[in-house]
Amino acid sequence: MKTLPTLGRMPIVLTGPALVVLLVVFGIPIILLFLASLNAPAFSFANYQAFFGQPANIRVLFQTVEISVVATAICLLIGYPTAYLIVAASKRLRMALIVLVLVPYLTSGLVRTYAWIVILGDRGLINNLLLDHGLISSPLPLIYNRMAVYIGMVHIMLPTMILPLVSVMMGIDKSLMAAARSMGARPFAAFWHVFFPLSMPGVRGGSLLVFVICLGFYITPAALGGLGDAMLSTFIASQVKTFFNMARVAATAFILLAVAIVVLSVFGLDLSGAQGRKPQQVQNSWLGRLPSFGPLLRYLGEFLAPRRGKRWVAQLFQAGHESRWSKVVGVLFLALVMFYLLFPEILVVIMSFSAGKYLEFPPSGLSLQWYRSFFSDPSWYAAAWTSIQIGVVVAALSTMLGTLAAYGLSSTLPRLRSFLTMVILTPITFPVIVVGIATYLGLLKLGLLGTMTGIVLAHTIGAIGYVVVTVSATLANFDPRLEQAAMSMRAGPFRTFMRVTLPLIRPGIIGGAVFAFLASFDEVIITSLVAGLSIRTLPLKMWEDIRHQIDPTIAAVATLLILLPLFILMILYVAGWRSTLSLQRARPADAA
């Protein structure tokens, strides 16, 4: 009976179960992996020297960094104006646009890659339309090249760039822009000197997140790229499948990890807002390091001061008006971005109802033949049932461990909280192929390779991070005085948590469980390493069919996976709506 009060006084203990699972499955193995790369206990850099001694390896390394940088830059160039326009829209339109971004974000990356194969393939949508209209005599080489890789990677990662930017931009005080405009600043000057510096945390956070994830890309480059577009993750996977030399594989994995760590260390991953910064911090940023233009700008400022003063008096306290053309351009840009994000998925859904022997657009007739093929083929529905089972267990286990960890972290010291949060989020911030190799080694030591338990543990170490992030965000808005009030009425810690805390943070817990399930259900790379030959999940089955044969049944499977996020969003909406009603009912009691 004394256990709960003790835990209430030591909330850090609640992070213990999550840290133990993380340590056993991932933490200790990655340390052993690093020692193996150094040929412990002899300790030498022979494996690293062997890697850099081959020009082909260096070329693949630089190619990986190049592709990741270019994909990140394209995502930023498209994502920043998209996020800005979403934030500038009305409340209802903003919510609709965010949902439209969330749908592809929650959709399987494998499905979206498959959609681009259908569009860009030699017998894909674009080539078929051009051939049917007589514009070309032979299919254009739209696939298996670098451009196809960029199209697929940017399509998958663009929501990951947009969402952090929207989150930061919505926290920027709009009155600052209005104040700059009322002082005579032109719209672009007000944006560049006020809004853009305050949005830099979103730019930095989104760019680093996209870059690190791109470093570990495996499926999209392998499916859309050619032999000259291989990335280091593909190279590592081929090493595992052909000649499994643990020391060589470990060295290659840690070279990729070193690139990610160096970039994160130099730029720093900070998603927090910039509103609390001191003015000196903005002035000392790179925006203010233009000394060569200082005298010229001051001279022009003095020359134009009288004219600016007259314009300021005339426009004081007048709201800025956007030109008609800027609105038109903004609407067209948003429409193109949403078309780019959603059209591939809509195309797959339409083609899945084709009545022909092959996928075609537009369909010559409507039929459910590919859905019947899915439900009548044991290899398909057995793989789907396996994925559902694993996903449910992973969601339950990671939600329990992640919620306890988030609740414990919310009451710890800030520095310790930051350190432990960084440790828990390691599996989702490291390149996925590195996590897969370390997890493979950990499950090998535990004797769990090729088992359902092993796959569940491998998925759980990453799913815990999603739960911790989601529940922590909910706890950040939770008023601890409600718990204090309950305890003052002689409610114990457990009763207080169940009757007060849990109902109010339920949307975060449900959201964390949903993200954990989706992360498990969509996992391919780690599963391919630890599943062995006896267990086949739905993503593995899809990936094998995409690589060896384009079975039209995949379109039906992809459609079911596209509809899954819509169902998930409905669950999150209902959970949030019920929580809002509970909070509204609690307010009259508080006021009384």
Image: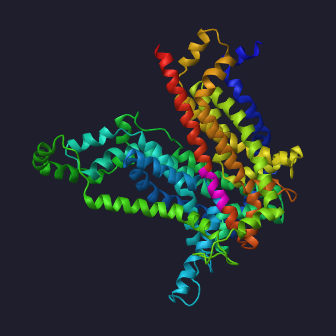
In the foreground, 350 or 95: 350
Front in this rendered view, residue 142 or 275: 142
Q: Looking at the image, can residue 145 be seen?
A: yes
In the picture, measured across the screen, residue 327 lies left or right of residue 108, that is: left
Q: Is residue 40 visible?
A: no
Q: Specify start and end residues of the magenta stretch as a single range.
A: 559-566
- Quadrant in which the N terminus is drawn: top right
> Residue 527, position in %: x, y?
77, 54
Is residue 543 or residue 563 the one in the foreground?
563
Total marks shown come to: 0
Spot occupied by residue 432 in the image (x, y as percentages of width and height): 69, 53
Q: How is the image coloured?
A: rainbow
Residue 128, position as x, y percentages in the image: 57, 81
In x, y percent, where is residue 552?
A: 70, 71
Tell me which corner region of the image, top left, top right, bottom left or bottom right, holds residue 327: bottom left
**Residue drawn 62% across and 56% down?**
563
- Verify whether residue 319 appears in magenta: no
Residue placed at 73% from the left, 64% from the top? 542
Q: Dominant secondary structure of the magenta stretch?
A: helix
Magenta stretch encompasses residue 563: yes
Q: Is residue 590 above or below residue 160?
A: above
